[in-house]
Structures are given as C-alpha cells and as structure tokens.
Image: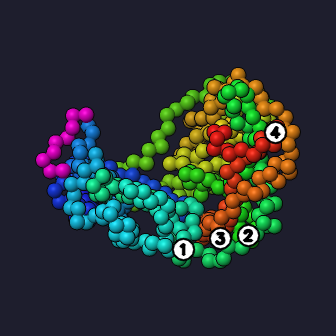
Amino acid sequence: MDEKLRNVVDHTQAALGLHNHRLERYHFFREKNHLNETAYILNMEWFPEGVASAEDGLNPAGTAVADVNFYTGAVRGITFVDGINSADNSLYPTASTKEEVIEWVEDMTGLTFGRQFRIERDDKQVLRFAAAVDNIPVSPGGIIRTEFNDDGVLMVFYIDGEFPEADQIEWEPFALTPDKYEPVAKAQCQLVAYPDEAQEKWVAVYGLEEVFLTNDASRTIPFTIGEDTGSFVEKDDILRWDKPLDGNFEQKDIDLSPEVTLETVLADEPHPDSLPLTESEMTACVQEVLRFMRLVYPNESGKRKLIGFLLKDGYIIAELKPAEEKMQKMFGNKIKLVIERDTLTAIHYIDQSWLLEGFKHFAEATKPVVTVEEAFDLLREYLQVDPVYVYDNSRDHYMMCGKIDCDYGVNAMTGKVIKLSEMA
C-alpha cells in the first residue's frame, strides 16, 4: 500500500476506534465546492474482525463505512451497518445528552456551535444541524447529521457542504423593509400550470419564485437547490437557423461518476470543473448547440433559446428553454445538452418534456381571470422574508440577503388562496 494512503488509513482506524476491524475495501472520490476548491475523499469499508465477506457482496452487520478527506484527515462521515456500532464506544457520544453530541461534533469538525452551525432537527434518534452564522442560515450551506439506534449508540455521522469562517462574512444587520422587498416579490409572482388529475386539466396558479434580495435591495441572486451553479454562465440567445442538417445525432453514454484513481489523488490535480469556461469554448459550444438543434429539432428555429452553460464533472451542460412560454408548466420543458469539454462535441441530451407525456390528454389551463396585481395583493400577507447570508461569486464572500418565499399560491380563475404543497 502507498505510504501516504497507509498513513491516512492508520489515522482513521485510530481516530474512529476501529482497532477490532480490518480494512476490506476502499475507493477514491473527487469533489469541488462552490469556492472552486478540490477535495479528494477516501471511502473505506472496515469489517469487524472474524466476519467474512458476504457472498452477495453486501457489507456484514457492524461494518464501519467511513469517508475521510485524503489530505486533511478530516472525517466526512461514518455509518455502522445494520445499527451495530462495534467500534470503541468510548470515542462516541450517546443520544442521552444533547450537549455531549454537540461537543463531539465540534471536536470532529472544528466548528463552533451557534457561530457556525445550529440545530435544525431534534428527534429522539436524529440530531441534525445546518450551517449558520450566529444562528442566521447561509446559502449554499452545509448539514451535519447524527443518528442513533434504540440504545442511544451513534450509528451515523456525516458532514456535507460549507460552513463559512468569520473572515468570509460581510457583517451587517438585516435591513429589508416591505417598501424594498415587496416590488421584487411582485416581480417574482408568476403563472404556473399545475396538473389537476381529478379534472384531467391544467390549472393556472400564481406563485412566487424563491429569490434572494441583497440587503440594499439593489439586486437579486437566484435561489438554487443542490446543483453547484458557481460555474454557470448566463446566456439569452434565441436559436435560429435557415436550413436543417441531414443525419442523425448519436447518443453516447456519459460518465458522471466522481470516482478517481490513487494516481490522480497523489497528483492532487484540480477538479476539471474548477477551470472556468473560456470565451473560445463558449463560442464553439454555441455553434455545437446550433448543430444539435438543426439535427434533432430541425423545425424549431426561433422556438428555443440558450439560457446558459454549466460545468459538470468534466462536461459542459448547455441548457435550453422555450423562447416563449405563455404559462410555464410545473415540470418545466428544458433540454440539457451534454458537450465533451475535451472535444467540444455534443454527445448526449435530455429532453425534460418526457415528464409531460403522462398529461398529454389533459385540457390546457383556462385563460386567467385574476390579474397578477390582484394575485399579489392576496399573497402579500403570506410573504416570508428571512435573513440569509448568501455567497456572492463576484465578491467571494457571504453577504446579507433576504430570502423571499411564499408557501401559498392563487388560483388564477377563482382567486382562491391555496397551499402550493397540496397542488404537487
């Protein structure tokens, strides 16, 4: 075994009290966060001594599955299979004392409770934390989860995402007032068609699209879930062409797996997505998008627009939407085109319109009777505007914003206020 790898393995075994376990398997994974930092993760499966591998390849009870940052040694997660923690339990907290769990999490992560993370969920067997700055949420943020078995013994710990340091924060008090955020909230009020399965028709509903508003109300920052949008380059190009192209588009398999080899880990190469798109790459990609459209959607000149490019595990993702959409349907109608970054050639695409196939027989939504002004007046009392520290790519800092959201919508025909979660 490589010497550096052996050092990480030995450190992990000691830190997690796995002296009566043997390392059965290991893998390497590469990640990139929204700060463009690359991390290499060593995933290890530790079997209890004397327990053989199962014929079905599954991990036996008591196996400890651990994720560790290869270069820092920081534990990213540990899970004990089938709820059996056969490690040195003196190194782990129990569910009986919340303060003990918090102190253990602080020791494991180097974070400070209250300053960098707060309790988000507190159940008998689950204690979940979220990234925060002085108990104010952050975005993108991070989560920490601890789970315990019926005896109160720790079964799961993992940490994921970002927990900002003090020097990453632009400190200021929350200052948004209704006169500043209501005009923005009104602009976010949009018509969306929801499927009504009982009536087999689409129903037009006004709802607010979540958005962050800077504390000085000068601009908005899009709200996104899950996907790393730090590399996103916005476009607004209507796709037009004079003639279609003859031929077929060949769909190829794509590999989005983050797994890498030990050689790549030891080379400490940066994640391919940490290198920003160049102007020449984007120019070539626009032409490749047009070539794709002329092959696959030859009769849709002027009907689609390119909204941007995104980097994803060594690929460039081009996102296309309808150029004009009277009313957006709940499931969207986006095309994602996957372009190889090495060759700048499109190799795969996903047309999300397949999500609408099951609703083809539904009647279209009736033209709205309620105006957007009337709808917003009805929703005003349900508005939620909460302080959040949001990472700003242009400043490389987290800045105070207000998260504008609303759990309710307005039926565009009847004017009835409805809970949106009941429409999904």
Instruction: Give the label on residue 400, or none.
Output: 3
- Of residues 261 and 27, the one nearer the viewer is 27
Residue located beneath label 4 in the image: 414
Q: CA distance from mark 4 to mark 2?
A: 32 Å
- Of residues 156 and 240, the one nearer the viewer is 156
The quarter in which the C terminus is drawn is top right
Q: CA distance from mark 4 to mark 1?
A: 43 Å
Dot 4 and dot 3 residues touching (CB under 8 Å): no
Dot 1 amino acid type? Asp
Disc 4 or 1, which lies upstream in sequence? 1
The quarter in which the N terminus is drawn is bottom left
Disc 1 or 2, which lies upstream in sequence? 1
Whether residue 287 is visible, yes or no, is no
Q: CA distance from mark 4 to mark 3?
A: 38 Å
Q: CA distance from mark 3 to mark 2?
A: 10 Å
- Residue at image x 54%, y 77%? 167
Mark 4 secondary-structure assignment:
loop
**Percent x, y for residue 242?**
80, 31
**Percent x, y for residue 143?**
47, 59
What residue span does the magenta drawing correspond to? Answer: 48-56
Tell me, yes or no, whether the highlighted magenta stretch contains residue 269.
Answer: no
Disc 3 or 2, which lies upstream in sequence? 2
Image position of 124 with respect to 170: above or below: above
Disc 4 or 3, which lies upstream in sequence? 3
- Residue at image x 67%, y 51%? 407
Mark 3 vs mark 2: give the one in front. 2
Residue located beneath label 2 in the image: 176
Mark 4 vs mark 2: give the one in front. 4
Dot 3 and dot 2 residues touching (CB under 8 Å): no
